Amino acid sequence: MIVRNIVGGKPSHDIVTVKRDDTVRTAVEILARHRIGAVIVSDDGAIVDGILSERDIVRALGTVGAACLEAKVKDLMTSSVVGCHYDDTAHAVLGKMTEGRFRHMPVIEDNRMVGVISIGDVVKARLEEIEMENSALTGMIANSW
């Protein structure tokens, strides 16, 4: 299974972004409203400047307290973002996420963000793929008797 098939059912207008100069409080409100665990940081909505996750926010809360909510997103975001492409396999994406210990990844085509994929999306797709393989193998075994 490739990324294109996984994010194909998710409209591109579902990409949730914040700007670098937004406050962390604004980002937290957006995360809560959309019930997501990370938000892409992009001043123009297409070029990825960074990513801000729940983990980034919790880490800041633990070190500086609630004052971090008034900080700018650019001060907490991860700026070295690992992305993927439509033709990457689910296995490759899962490997990158596991190795990097992150759960969200922008999908980039022609240097522009076209979607966001989460570890939940990848796991769900892999489970569906495994179920189809299981059904096919079960059918082959049943037909061989």
Image (tube, rainbow, N blue to C red):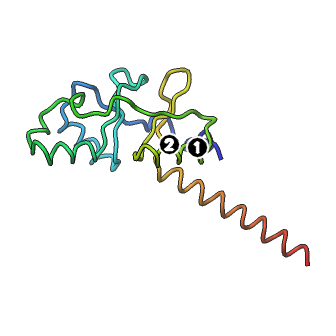
Q: Residues within 10 Å of mark 1 (few under 14, many from 20)?
A: few
The answer to whether 112 appears left or right of 61 in the picture is right
Residue at 60% x, 34% y: name it.
86
Q: Quadrant of residue 139?
A: bottom right
Q: Residues within 10 Å of mark 2 (few under 14, many from 20)?
A: some
Residue type of the residue flagged with mark 2: Lys
Q: Quadrant of residue 142?
A: bottom right
Taking depth in this image into account, of 112 and 60 the one nearest to the observer is 60
| x and y percentages locating residue 127 in the rendered image | 59, 60
Residue 52 is labelled as none
- Residue bearing mark 1: 92
The answer to whether 76 appears left or right of 44 in the picture is left
Residue at 61% x, 38% y: name it.
88
The answer to whether 73 appears left or right of 119 in the picture is left
Residue type of the residue flagged with mark 1: Ala
- Residue bearing mark 2: 96
Give the secondary structure at mark 1. Answer: helix
Query: Does the residue at mark 1 contact the one at mark 2 (Cβ under 8 Å)?
Result: yes
Which quarter of the rendered picture does the C terminus lie within?
A: bottom right
The answer to whether 27 appears left or right of 135 in the picture is left
C-alpha span from label 1 to label 2: 6 Å
Q: Measured along the vertical axis of the image, is residue 34 above or below residue 135?
A: above
Q: Measured along the vertical axis of the image, is residue 97 above or below residue 74?
A: below
Q: Quadrant of residue 60?
A: top left
Q: Measured along the vertical axis of the image, is residue 142 above or below residue 129?
A: below
| x and y percentages locating residue 61 in the rendered image | 15, 46
Give the secondary structure at mark 2. Answer: helix
Residue at 30% x, 37% y: name it.
52
